[in-house]
Image: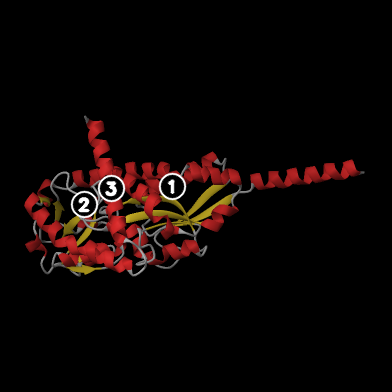
C-alpha cells in the first residue's frame, strides 16, 4: 500500500513538472518607439525570437510599441516595476531623479561617439557604480544612444555664437542644462513629437542621435547636421536600458531564467551595439554632404569650456541625495580611459 502511494506521489510530481515544462510564458514588452522602428525590427523582435527558439516555444514576447500599454515614456520604469509590463525599454533619465547614479554617464563630453565605443563603458559603469539605482528590477541591458549631435531646420551650428537664442529639443536634464550653457533654450518632448514641432517651427533643432533620426523622420524636416572634430567626445548621450519585472523573472522556471540570463547583459549589449552603429553610419551616409557641417576643434573646445558647470552643478544636486557625484564622474572617466588605452594597444 505504501509503495502504491509513493508511486502515485512520484507520478503526480512528474506530471506537475511536465506540465510546468510545457507551459508557455508570454512576456509583455513595452517601449515608446513605433513598431516600424529599427529598434523593434532588428533588436527587440530578433531577441524575442531567440528566446522562443531556445525555449522550444515556451517563452515568447508580446511587444507593445508606441506606449500601447498606456502612460508616457517617463512612466515606463514604474510600469515594469508595478507589473503593468513584464519588460520595458526606456531611458532612465526620462524619470528625473529616480536613477541618480547612472546620470553620471550622461554628463557632457564624457562618452566617445559610437555604440561599440560607448556601450562597454556604460555597462561596466552600471556594474561597478550604479546597481543600487536599479534595486527591484532585473536589468537585461544597459547601453547608450551612440552620442548626440545638432540637427537643425534652417541654421547651421558650428560655434557657440550660432546657438544663441535657438530652441533645441533636449532628451534629459543633463542635455537640457548643456543646451542652456550654450545660450540656447531647451525644450522637452518625446521623440515622436519632434518632427511635427520642427516642421511647425516650435523648435529650431534637436540634440539627438544620428541612429534614430530616420525612424522619427527628423531627417525630413532638418537641413543641417553638425559634426564634431574626429575623435572628439560626444556632446552628451542618453543611457537606455531594458528592464524586467523582478518578480516576473523569479516566477519563471529555472531553465527559462537561464535562457534569459544567457541572452542578456553583455551578450544583449553587444547585439544592440552592432545594430545601433549600423544605423548611425547609414544615416550619415544617406545625408547629402552639403547638409553636414563641421565644428572646428577650437569651437568644439569652446563648447566644452562653456559646459563645465553642468557636471559641477550635477555633483551638488546628487550630493543632497547622499550620492558622491565626483567619485562617479571619476569612475566614468577611469573606465573610458582604460578602454581607450586598450583599444590603442590593440590597434598597434
Residue at the spot 13% in from the left edge and 59% down from the top edge: 305
| Image location of residue 9, percent across then percent down | 81, 46
In front here: 318 or 89?
318
What residue is pinned by disc 3?
A: 334
31 or 215: which is nearer to us? 31
Q: In which quarter of the image is the C terminus?
A: top left
Query: Relative to residue 23, is residue 237 drawn left or right?
Result: left
Q: How crowded is mark 3: few (under 14 residues within 10 Å), some or many (20 or more)?
A: some
Q: Which of 163 and 122 is in front in this view?
A: 122
Q: Residue 45 carries which label?
A: 1
Q: Which residue lies furthest to the top in this view?
A: 348
Mark 3 and mark 2 lie on one chain; the one further toward the N terminus is 2
CB-based contact (under 8 Å), mark 3 and mark 2? no
What residue is shown at x 21% (from left), y 54% (from top)? 109
In which quarter of the view is residue 346 placed?
Answer: top left
Residue 253: percent from left, percent from top = 61, 48
Disc on res. 234: 2
Q: On screen, 181 above or below 112?
A: below
| Residue 279 visible (yes or no) | no
Image quadrant where one finds the N terminus: top right
Pointers 3 and 1 in contact (CB under 8 A)? Answer: no
| In this view, 71 is above or below 207 | below
Q: Earlier in the sequence, mark 2 or mark 1?
A: 1
Amino acid at each position: 500500500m505504501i509503495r502504491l502511494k509513493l508511486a502515485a506521489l512520484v507520478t503526480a510530481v512528474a506530471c506537475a513538472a511536465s506540465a510546468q515544462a510545457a507551459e508557455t510564458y508570454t512576456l509583455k514588452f513595452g517601449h515608446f518607439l513605433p513598431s516600424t522602428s529599427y529598434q523593434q525590427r532588428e533588436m527587440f523582435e530578433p531577441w524575442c525570437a531567440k528566446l522562443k527558439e531556445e525555449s522550444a516555444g515556451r517563452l515568447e514576447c508580446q511587444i507593445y510599441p508606441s506606449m500601447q500599454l498606456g502612460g508616457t515614456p517617463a512612466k515606463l520604469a514604474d510600469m515594469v516595476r508595478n507589473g503593468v509590463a513584464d519588460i520595458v525599454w526606456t531611458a532612465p533619465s526620462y524619470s528625473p531623479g529616480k536613477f541618480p547614479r547612472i546620470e553620471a554617464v550622461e554628463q557632457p563630453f564624457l562618452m566617445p561617439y559610437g555604440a561599440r565605443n560607448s556601450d562597454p563603458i556604460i555597462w561596466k559603469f552600471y556594474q561597478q557604480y550604479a546597481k543600487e539605482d536599479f534595486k527591484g528590477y532585473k536589468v537585461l541591458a544597459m547601453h547608450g544612444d551612440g552620442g548626440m549631435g545638432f540637427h537643425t531646420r534652417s541654421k547651421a551650428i558650428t560655434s557657440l555664437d550660432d546657438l544663441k537664442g535657438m530652441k533645441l529639443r533636449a532628451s534629459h536634464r543633463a542635455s537640457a542644462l548643456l543646451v542652456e550653457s550654450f545660450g540656447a533654450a531647451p525644450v522637452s518632448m518625446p521623440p515622436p513629437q519632434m518632427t511635427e514641432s520642427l516642421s511647425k517651427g516650435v523648435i529650431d533643432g534637436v540634440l539627438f542621435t544620428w541612429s534614430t533620426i530616420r525612424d522619427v523622420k527628423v531627417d525630413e524636416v532638418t537641413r543641417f547636421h553638425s559634426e564634431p572634430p574626429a575623435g572628439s567626445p560626444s556632446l552628451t548621450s542618453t543611457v537606455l536600458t531594458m528592464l524586467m519585472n523582478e518578480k516576473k523573472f523569479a516566477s519563471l522556471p529555472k531553465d527559462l531564467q537561464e535562457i534569459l540570463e544567457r541572452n542578456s547583459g553583455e551578450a544583449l549589449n553587444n547585439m544592440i551595439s552592432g545594430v545601433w552603429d549600423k544605423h548611425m553610419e547609414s544615416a550619415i551616409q544617406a545625408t547629402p554632404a552639403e547638409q553636414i557641417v563641421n565644428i572646428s576643434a577650437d569651437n568644439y573646445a569652446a563648447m566644452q569650456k562653456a559646459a563645465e558647470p553642468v557636471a559641477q552643478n550635477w555633483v551638488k544636486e546628487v550630493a543632497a541625495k547622499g550620492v558622491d557625484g565626483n567619485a562617479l564622474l571619476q569612475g566614468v572617466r577611469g573606465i573610458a580611459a582604460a578602454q581607450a588605452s586598450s583599444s590603442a594597444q590593440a590597434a598597434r
